[in-house]
Image (tube, grey):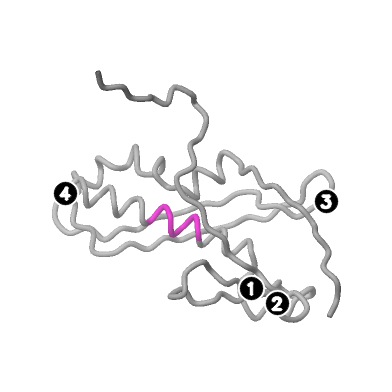
Amino acid sequence: MDTHTEVTSGAPQKVAEFDIQVEQLDGYEFRARFDKEQYETLLLDEPKPLGRDVAPNAVRIIAAAVGNCLAASLVFCAQRAGARVEGVVSRVHVELVRNERRRLRIGRIDVKLEPRVSGELAGLEKCLDSFEDFCVVTQSVREGLNVNVSVEPQGSS
């Protein structure tokens, strides 16, 4: 008799994990090292007056991640639906606001996707109701993220 176990719980199931390292270089300038050797390091900095504004800050990285994820999801869906996407531009607009405690927050992110499709639009149109649901970043941001933080001071050398 064959037996199998079904996942009946609505709890998320871990399918992958990775680690990155973010290291302070000078002031508010940081370098992110990714989990794969082939990935270039990424420089981050805060705008003036805090930082020197020599690289994007974390808010801009989130905006880029949302724009990239939505564009990639649209391309994937359109190709599966038979549409010929020859390129896509994702224009991301971010509005920063202050909350009730005067802390700076991302108030909204507006994304405009501009796919270049050759031929019929029917394949692309099939995707318009579903492609967003497959964007890991956008849906995670929309639902809110569980971020656990610990601080572990290290001795100076």
Residue at image location 70% in from the left, 77% down from the top = 29
Q: Of discs 1 and 4, which sits in the foreground? A: 1
Residue picked out by circle 3: 102
Give the spatial CA distance, label 1 vs label 2: 6 Å
Direction front: furthest residue: 1
- Would you say the residues marked 1 and 2 are in contact, meaning their CB atoms lie under 8 Å apart? yes
Q: Of discs 4 and 3, which sits in the foreground? A: 4
Give the spatial CA distance, label 3 vs label 2: 24 Å
Q: Of discs 3 and 2, which sits in the foreground? A: 2
Residue picked out by circle 4: 82
Residue picked out by circle 1: 44
Secondary element under disc 3, as helix, strand or loop, is loop
Give the spatial CA distance, label 2 vs label 4: 44 Å
Mark 1 or 4 closer to N-term? 1
Give the spatial CA distance, label 1 vs label 4: 39 Å
Mark 4 or 3 closer to N-term? 4
Left or right, residue 111 beside residue 131:
right
Label placed on residue 29: 2
